[in-house]
Each structure stands twice: as structure tokens, then as C-alpha cells.
Image: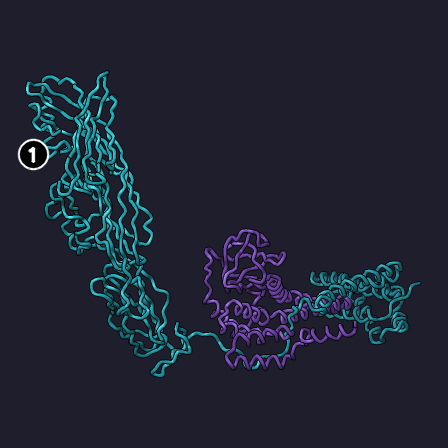
Chain colours: A cyan, B purple
Amino acid sequence: MRRIGDKAGFRLSTFGFREGRPDSARRGLPKAESRLLAFAVAFCAAAPAPAVPSLESDLSPDHVSPGETAVYTLTVTDAEGGELSYPPFGRLVVRHQSNSMQSVFSFGGGGAGGVRMSRVYTWVLEPPAPGRYELAPATLKFQNQVYRSAPAVLVCEAGAAPAPAPPHAQRPQARPPSVFQDPFGGDDDAGAFPFGFTAPVQPRGEGDVFLRATVDRTEAWLGEQVTLGVYLFSQADVTGVQTLSFPRLDGFWAEDVETPTQLMPEVRTVGGVAYRAYMLRRRALFPLRAGEISIDPIEAQVNLGLALFFGARGETVKRRSVPVKLNVRPLPADGQPPGFDAANVGVWNLEARAGPTSVAAGQPVQLRVTLEGTGNLKGLRLPPPKLPEGLRTYDPTTTEKIRIAGARYGGSRTVEYVIIPERTGRFAIPPVELAYFDPAQGYRTARSQPIVLDVSAPAGPAGAPSAARPDAAGPAGTNVLGAGPRPARAHPSLAARALVPAWDEPWFRPLVAAPPALWLLVWAGGLLIGAVRSRDPVRARARRARGVALRRLRAASRLASEGKAAEFHAEVARALAEFVTDRLGIPATGLVREALAARLKEHGCDPARADALVALLETCENARFAPGASSGAAMDRVHEEARRLVDALDDAPERRAA
Amino acid sequence: MRSAAALLLCIVAAPAVRAEAPPEQLLSEADAARGAGDYAKAALLYGRLAGAGVRNEDVYYNIGTMQLQAGRRGEAILAFERALRVAPGDADAAWNLRVAQRGNVDKLVGAREEEPFLERLGARVPERSAALAFLALWAGGGALLVAARLRRRSGASLGGTGLVCLLVSVIPAALLYAAWARASVEYAVVVSPAAAVREGPARDFRAAFEIHEGLKVRVLSRDRGYLRVHLPNGLEGWVAEPDAPVI
């Protein structure tokens, strides 16, 4: 089937070297340049070649050893829509089958040439036992014609094939991590696997596109990193990977270590066939249990495209890797520190720093513990520092930085503690220790440096509130007195305190209501008495007599201030006379002075007051007719005396009703 | 047969109906437990003392201090609040209350002042003294007014004095009103480590949020063993009464 130089022409395949270009040609011209050249030549061609359908078969190799496979290929050219019948494979085991489209531009020697479309069907066949296996011709029905391919014979016998590559199982089980530094170092042999990995058992020549999952070691310690790589091998152009589905990875703690953002092919040869190999993902797996653990197949959907020059369509294929088995060994019991945590596997360094190291009691100190190295950082358990008594700490804050170097997962974890010294003195914080298992060297212990804190007495007045506890007594005998709860009372009172508020006491509301009630009572009584008295006009006039007299005296006072002495004295005399008449029922105006005095005394008035009244009335009478003799002071005296007499006589018994 | 059954019932029930020990004995047992460092038992005995009717600031203060020592902050805060309710000027109770409240974990976003001004004023008023001052001024002023009414000639001065007394009585009356306003508002303290605040007064209602030990909440109403509580930042809901006893 190799058509190099066949019929005085040659082929260019969009799949690169799929059609068997010699290696020298492949390596001599870069792919892009080859396509440019083909494009230029194609435009120089004068006329297209006539489409001639063809069916060709190929079996390679035709002699294999037991356990090996052969590739049977049918190529149908320019027969789109034809009906192909491939031969029965009988007892041969079909390990893989695939098909692909090819666009081939051919040039004839006389200028005839053109684009030819071929579909290639591939089967990977494995004889179940030594023997001779005959493959009948395949048939193609196209446009009422039948095309037949040549029959083929596969012979399986020991030592029949060229010496194969060493079996994968005989390769070193695990390689040191340094192989990742040069994954493509050295030329590749048949069956050899790139990237420095041990390849799983994988049928050779399984097709033009296949997926491989590999691990950098098949035996590992519990918790030791195993790097899983997923690679896509293809002889066709890969334009993208739609999906990459991982199994559940039970029994592992998994972290991504490399996820390429674009496909970067590397040319590798597998089973004598050149492939483009794409690294799709690398993950660090940390086994969580001992024993044999299987990594289930990984699936990928791959887009295969064709060169734009030839305008053919692409296709999407789904590929699965074969399962990978790991043997996980438990951590050795010999030399295991007591209380060792099985998650602490890797290579680790510890560092602890504190600042400030000289503080006053109650002031915070920051202690920073940093763990750095390679291994499962997220699963690692770092013990807290053992602080001496007198140092109090709060919940720490933790930060992690992941670092991946050469596909080794690791990084640093920083734990920050705030420490409050509760007393003065010198405190030695012992080293923080982490026991871990180094897969290369066994059990190890990472230690930080010890730290010494000098704590002095706080500044300020004694007894000032601080964060320190009052019961903390330092070795130097210095107490840091601060704010704590006060003690219980030694002799609490047994007297029940009145819990009833004052407003709920029985005496409160009556006392509040009493004053207004009493006032209302008095007011109402006054009204009642007034109403009763108002029925007797004489007595009513007697009760109003004082008020009337006082009003007249105020009017007289105004007259005095105006200098009207005669009118003043007349008004005073009228006020006194009316008062005596209304209040006491004695007609003052119709009696002589002596008779008036006698009647007043009869009525029960104080004789002195009666005489004084008569005398004042006489003074007023005299002044009315000799007003010029009355000075302002004299009028004031008269007014004052009249006022005094009204108040005094008001206490005399009232007149009785006639 | 019936009398024998009654006798048996009396024998069986006798311990259950045993009278509470006298206060002096409870106090001495509580002091002994406190001295032995058994703070939980001491708090229980002081609580029984209060249950026996000895309710004063000393007993509540000791209950709070013992609960604080025993690590039950919610119960301690409740007891200190009760001590301050009885004796608002108790400095020790106020101090220990602040110490206990330092451990509160609930940070109320958007909380206003803890209590309105009137209630804070009322908390500081010696309500009985204010009541006596008010009554003296009120009754005295009223009596003077009555006397002024009865005595017409010297009534003006008496009436003036009485009015002044009545005007001055407004001051203790206002203080008394503040104390009343304070006393008429109920508060509760969360004593459970965490209490669900539900949307209704039953366990079936959805828990809207959670409050924690030591938080003081205002009680708006009660219904079927649940308290409708109001938080200083406006949140409201229903909490089971055993989780947040009323002060």
C-alpha cells in the first residue's frame, strides 16, 4: 500500500505522515512548508485527474509472535457512498478499530492531478494462538461495480517477528523525579513511552488516536505522591479536547499539578509508528489507604480536524485509557514515632519566629510557624506549639501557598498565633516539632528553633485594667493585677428585699388621691354652704360686706393719691358706714356717734375698736369740711386705720336675719 | 385495706413533700460548697435560697458569681441582672455583669443604644425614695391649698406655698415615671449555649436565626411557653422561655 513515488507521482496527506512518508522526508521539511509547497504545486497543475475508485488492503506486519498485534487497513479512495464489506476476522481478536478520512492531492507526470478523498479503516488484530490466519478479500460496491482487495495471511509463530522492544513490565517500576526535567530526552523506541513514565500494558498499534494514563511509579508508600499523567497520542490533527473525564479516584487525595491551556504536540514513536503526543493533564495522587488501588479509565472527547486548504470536515472521537493499578505499601512500623500521624508524608522543614520578644505583660506577641516542603500539604497535620504556663493564646490564623516544582506538589503553610503573656518573667517556648515520613530516608522530625520571651511589668498605675488574669503569679513574684470578676459575698443578707414597687404598695394610690379629693371636698362644701347662705339676702350682704368695704377703701386710696382729700375722707366714711350696716346690721348713718358706739358694744364688738371706729368716722367728717388740713401722710394713716378696723370688726358676730 | 394503702402512700411520698430547709441552713450549705470550690452546687443552693423567698441583691449576686465561676455565663448574667433590678446601684453586680458579658459572641449589626433614655434613667432611680418624695410634696401641697381655701384672710400665702409644693412634686413624679417605665419593660437573658429564634411560638415554625448565651433581649409578649423577643438591632422572633428566662 505504500505509494511513495507510485505512478510517477506522490501523495501529500493532511494527516502528515499517515500515508507513510519516509522519515527523511518527514524530518527534512517542516509541516507548514510542505503544505505551502503542495499548495503552490497544486495551483500550477493544469487539469484535475479523473476520479478512479479503488480499494486497497494492507496487513502489517504479516508475521507476529504470540501476544503481538498486527494492523489490517482498508483504504477506499474516491468511492464516497459505496458499500464496503470487510472480511470476517474469524478467531482473530479485534483489539481496536477506527476509521478516518484523508484528502490526498496527487500530481500526474503529465500535469494530470487533483484532490482524492480516501477513507481508511483500521483494525488491530491479535492472534489468540500461533497459527496461520487467512483474511478474505474485502469488497466494495460502487456505481454498479464491485472492487475487491487482495487477500492477506497473518502468520503467528514464535520468533517470527523482529525483536520487539522490552516488555513494559520489565522496565524500572519507578523513576526518580528528575526524569521530569527532560521528558523527551533520548530517541524513542518501539513500545517505549515518552515523558519518563512507565507505560501500562497497552496494545501496540491500537489506532491513530488513543489515550494513555500513566503513573510515575506503580509502587508507593501510603501518602507518597504518585503523579498521574494523561496523554493523547494521535496521528491525525487534533484541534481540541472537548472533555476530559476523570474517574472518582477513590482512595486518593488528588491535586492538579499541570493543566496545559493549549495543546502542544511532541513527536513520539510508538510501536514503530510516529505519533503526535499531547499532554492533557497531570495530577498528584496521594494514596489514602494501603493495598492495591486501581485508577479507572479516563475518558476524553477529542476533536480531529483537517487542514483548511482541503476543506474537509472534522470529527469528534471518544477515547478511554486503560486502568492503571498501584500497589500502596503501608508506612513501616519500624522507627515510627509514637502518635505518628500517617498523613505527614513528604519532605518538610519547620521554622518559628516570634516578635517582639521583649514585651510588657498583657501585650500581644505574634508567633509565626512556617512549614515548607513537598508532599500533601493540605492533608498535613501540624501540632500546635507547647506554650509554657503564663502564656495564653487564641485561635491561630493559617495561610497556605501551593508550590509545584517539577511536578512535585508542595508549598508552605504559615500558622500565626497571638500570644498574651499573663505574667512577667522569662518564658522559653520549646521548638515546634513535626514527625514525618520521608519516602527516601524514612521517619524524620522537623524542628523549629526555641524562642525566648522576656515579659516585663506593664507601665501605668498599679491595678490598671489589663488583659492579664488577676490570679497569675509570675515566678519573679510579680502580680499583674487586672480586671476579673469580684468574689462572692461572705455573709449575704437573709432579709428579703421588697420587690413590690412603691406604686403597687397599698398605701401609694390613696395617698396620691387624697389631696385632690380633699380639696374637691372643701371646694364643694364651700359651694354648698354658699348656696345655702345665698337664700338669706341679709346674711349674704353681711358676708360680702368686707369685700365691698375693701373695694371702697381702694377707691379712696386712689382719690388720696390724686390729692382729693375731701372725696377721700367721704369715701372712707362711706366704706366704714356701709360695712357696719351690712356686716353688723347697725345703721351707722342714722345714729349719733355715741349711740353708734353703744350699739357696737351691745353687738359684742371690742369697746376699743368701737370707739376707734367712731373716732375715725368723726375724723373723716371733720376732714371733709376742712380738706386743706389733711396731708398725704394723714390720709395714709386714715386709710390704714380704716383697713385695720374692717378686718377687726369682720370677726364680730354677723347680723342675724331680721 | 384503704388505711394501709394511705399509710404506704404517705411513707413513699414523704421525701417528696419534705419541707425546704430553713434559709440559714441553705446559706450555710451554700457557703460550704463555695468554700470547697463546688461552684455549681453553691449556685444551686443560693438559687434555692432565692426560691425560698430570700430575694435580695446579695443572694442574686452570689448566684451570678458562682455561675460565672462554674462557666455558665448565661445564668451568671441573668443573676447579675436580677441583682441590679433589685438594687440598681450595686457596683459589684454591675462589674461582674460586664466581666461576664465579655464572652458574648453575638455581635448585633446595626444595633442602636442598648436601652432608651427613659429606661436607663429609671434603672438608676431609687424608686421608693422618689415615691416618698413625691407623696410628701403632693400631699403637703394639697393640704396647703385646702387650708388656704378654708382660711380666707391668710389663704393667699398658704395657697402659694401649696402651689409651689405641687410644682416641685413634678420632679420626683417624673423620676417615678421613669422607674415605672423601666419596671414595665421585661427583658430576658439567653442561658442556653444557642437558642433558635423562630418565626412563631411553636417548634414547628422555621428558625429564622440563632442567638447565643448571655445575650439580653427585650420581651414583647408571651404565648404558649414562647417569648416574642426584640433585639437592639430590630430583629424579632420567638424563643422558647426555658432558653431565655425573664429577668
Q: Quadrant of residue A614?
A: bottom right
Q: Kindly identify the amino acid type of the residue bearing the numbered disc 1.
A: Ala
Q: Quadrant of residue A356?
A: bottom left
Which residue occupies the foreground of this view, A128 or A657?
A: A128
Res A125 visible? yes
Q: Quadrant of residue A434?
A: bottom left
Question: x, y percentage for residue A430?
Answer: 28, 74
Residue beneath the point at 29% across and 40% down: A243
Q: Which residue is mark 1?
A: A25
Question: x, y percentage for residue B241?
Answer: 59, 61
Residue A36 relative to residue A370: left or right: left
Which part of the image, by quadrant, shows the C terminus of chain A?
bottom right
Res B157 visible? no
Question: x, y percentage for residue A82?
Answer: 24, 21
Q: Looking at this view, name the residue that lies furthest to the top.
A: A144
Given the image, what chain letter belongs to the residue carrying mark 1? A
Residue B195 relative to residue A382: left or right: right
Q: Looking at this view, name the residue that lies furthest to the bottom.
A: A477
